[in-house]
């Protein structure tokens, strides 16, 4: 007889555990066993002009904090170490600003919105469907878990969709954790 698989469990960010950080366009934190909120988006969901503006903002911010943007590609470890030398509160404010800009643009519904009409086959002829990099965040606590769940539920309405145009599946195993603050 096969043993019953373990039930999933919510594990928030542990400030006392090891965290590994790597950078692409966004910083990505990795912590063993932590629960993440992850957003994938279509490659055409952010216009090139907006991406160029973000790149300019990011490069100016890096230079203002004594980081050379080209070093990200040439020597990523050295760049990441320099980034981590910036005071934590300043880094977090910058990261929060970047995430806010991303979500505001995603809520504007740019691009083909192929998944909105459930016609993925028409997208197959394009070179890349998903954006190269996802947005991910280690969930900090039960309050943040509840906030992300509310965000997911409200997302179709924010995109101007009718209830019949979306499907929502709640991970019910999270209910006991998120309901503490919901």
Image: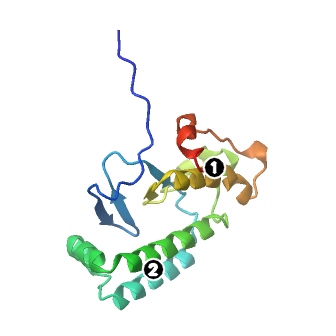
> Which residue: 41% across, 45% down?
11
SS class, disc 2: helix
Q: Nearer the viewer, residue 167 or 109?
A: 167
- Asked if residue 167 shows in the view, the reply is yes
Q: Is residue 119 above or below residue 42?
A: above
* Residue 158 placement (x, y as % from top left): 71, 59
Q: Nearer the viewer, residue 129 or 86?
A: 86
Q: Mark 2 — residue?
A: 55
Q: Quadrant of the N terminus?
A: top left
SS class, disc 1: loop
> Which residue: 79% across, 49% down?
162
For label 1, count other residues whose C-alpha is less than 10 Å away and answer few (under 14), some (14-19) or many (20+).
some
- Asked if residue 159 shows in the view, the reply is no
Looking at the rendered image, the disc whose residue lies closer to the viewer, 2 or 1, is: 1
* Residue 56 placement (x, y as % from top left): 46, 84
Q: How many marks?
A: 2
For label 2, count other residues whose C-alpha is less than 10 Å away and answer few (under 14), some (14-19) or many (20+).
some
User: Image quarter for residue 148?
Assistant: bottom right
Which labelled disc corresponds to residue 66? none
Q: Is residue 173 above or below residue 103?
A: above
> In terms of sequence position, does the residue under pointer 2 or pointer 1 come before the other?
2
> Which residue: 58% across, 35% down?
172
Q: Mark 1 — residue?
A: 182
Residue that protrudes farthest toward the front in the picture: 180
* Spatial CA span between label 2 and label 1: 36 Å
* Residue 16 placement (x, y as % from top left): 29, 57
Residue that protrudes farthest toward the top in the picture: 1
Q: Nearer the viewer, residue 80 or 59?
A: 80
* Residue 13 placement (x, y as % from top left): 39, 54
User: Is the Cβ of the residue at disc 2 closer than 8 Å to that at disc 1?
Assistant: no
């Amino acid at each position: 007889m096969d043993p019953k698989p373990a039930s999933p469990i919510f594990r928030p960010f542990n400030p006392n555990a090891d965290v590994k950080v790597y950078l692409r366009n966004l910083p990505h934190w990795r912590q063993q066993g932590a629960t993440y909120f992850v957003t994938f988006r279509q490659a055409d969901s952010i216009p090139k002009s907006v991406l160029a503006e973000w790149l300019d903002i990011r490069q100016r911010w890096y230079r203002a904090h004594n980081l050379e943007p080209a070093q990200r590609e040439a020597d990523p470890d050295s760049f990441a170490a320099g980034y981590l030398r910036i005071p934590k509160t300043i880094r977090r404010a910058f990261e929060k600003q970047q995430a806010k800009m991303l979500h505001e643009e995603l809520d504007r519904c740019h691009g083909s919105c192929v998944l909105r009409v459930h016609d993925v086959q028409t997208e197959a002829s394009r070179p890349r469907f998903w954006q190269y990099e996802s947005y991910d965040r280690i969930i900090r606590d039960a309050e943040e878990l509840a906030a992300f769940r509310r965000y997911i539920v409200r997302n179709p309405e924010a995109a101007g969709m009718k209830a019949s145009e979306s499907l929502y599946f709640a991970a019910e195993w999270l209910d006991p954790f998120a309901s503490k603050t919901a």
